[in-house]
Image: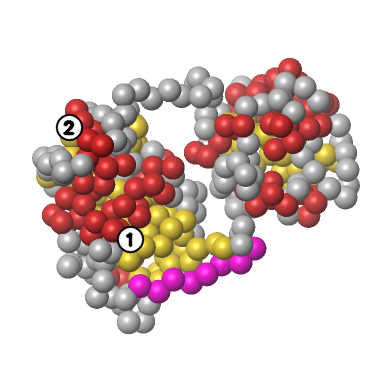
Amino acid sequence: MTDDILVFAEQRDDKLHPAALQIVTVARQLAGKTGGKVHAVVIGGPVEAAAAATDKAGVDGLLTISDPALAHYSALRYRTALAAAIGQVQPRIMLLPATFMGRDLAPRVAVRTRAALATDVIALDIGPDGGLVARRPIYNGKASAGVVFPKERPAIASVRPNAFAAPAPGAGGAPRTALPYAPAAGDDRLTVKEVVKAGGEVKDVAEADIIVSGGRALKSAENFKILYDLAKELDAAVGASRAACDAGYQPHSRQVGLTGKTVTPRLYIACGISGAIQHLAGMRGSKVIVAINTDKEAPLLKVADYAIIGDLFKVVPALTEEVRRLKN
């Protein structure tokens, strides 16, 4: 085992996931304390564009595992490929984004490589004895727990998206190593034949940097159009509260909350959402929260960084026009 750090550079359709760049930032910080190097691995079908973007993030070494069998994410096949990359680099620390893919993949790889694991971490450091120290939220974000890894055992951590900023792009030029995909027995038990994206080209709330969410106060699915107009100008995703989804205003794939999706965007704009505890649990980790509501006593206003007390049907269109004006 070396003092190096390996980053799983998640890609989809040869497009690098933004969270993959963000964990390069913390990997470099940790490498500065361990004295090791930062390696990244890109796994998929065609991976050239994703590998080039990873290279420019400032890694010291780049591994690629490209095979038609890896064109679509498969937990078993990606587990085998990532375990092979770990065997090649022999890192002390391995980091993944805590995306849907990362949360599914991390425990499988930890079992395969007999590594210790912490999930959905928001802070990482090297302890006095040289072991990895991680902090992860618990109790729906109301508290956090410290996880200490023994130095002599490989450590795997999935890092919450938007917990760190992405590094400035550089010139690249890291040495590359192409590894073959050698399927393990049983990898074909799970095969992905087709990937269907719900909602067409609309961004997934779980992966967006900016989210505009609406509650039951929108009163109908048609009225959500004003949120989609604002989201278009901000290049944002549209989310909804459980009440709005249960009422049929939006599909449950856009639901934010304890029974929906947990999100950590840079900006969360809540329109007509009172802030029930299950909704707060799903978006409390947002960097900046803006609440638009007529109720001054709404629970969401207590956690919001900015509050607009007013009619969302007047405020949101005005905000959209202002964003459009600033862009022009």
Split into 4 quadrants, where in the image is the N terminus? bottom left
Residue linked to disc 2: 67
Circles 1 and 2: CB atoms closer than 8 Å: no
Question: Closer to the camera, 2 or 170?
Answer: 2
Question: How far apart are labels 1 and 2 at the CA level?
Answer: 25 Å
x%, y% of residue 206? 53, 39
Q: Taking 108 as reference, is 312 above or below it?
A: above
Q: Taking 282 as reference, is 234 above or below it?
A: above
Q: Is residue 174 left or right of residue 135?
A: left
Residue linked to disc 1: 156
**Element under disc 2:** loop
Residue 193 visible from this viewpoint: yes
Boundaries of the magenta span = 142-149
The kind of residue on which mark 2 rests is Asp
Question: Closer to the camera, 93 or 182?
Answer: 182
Mark 2, other Cα within 10 Å: few <14 / some 14–19 / many ≥20? some
Q: Overall secondary structure of the magenta stretch?
A: strand
Say which label, 1 or 2, has the lower sequence index. Answer: 2
Which image quarter: residue 54? Answer: top left
Magenta stretch contains residue 148: yes
Magenta stretch contains residue 245: no
For the point 36% across and 82% down, the residue is 128
Residue 31 visible from this viewpoint: no
For the point 26% across and 47% down, the residue is 79
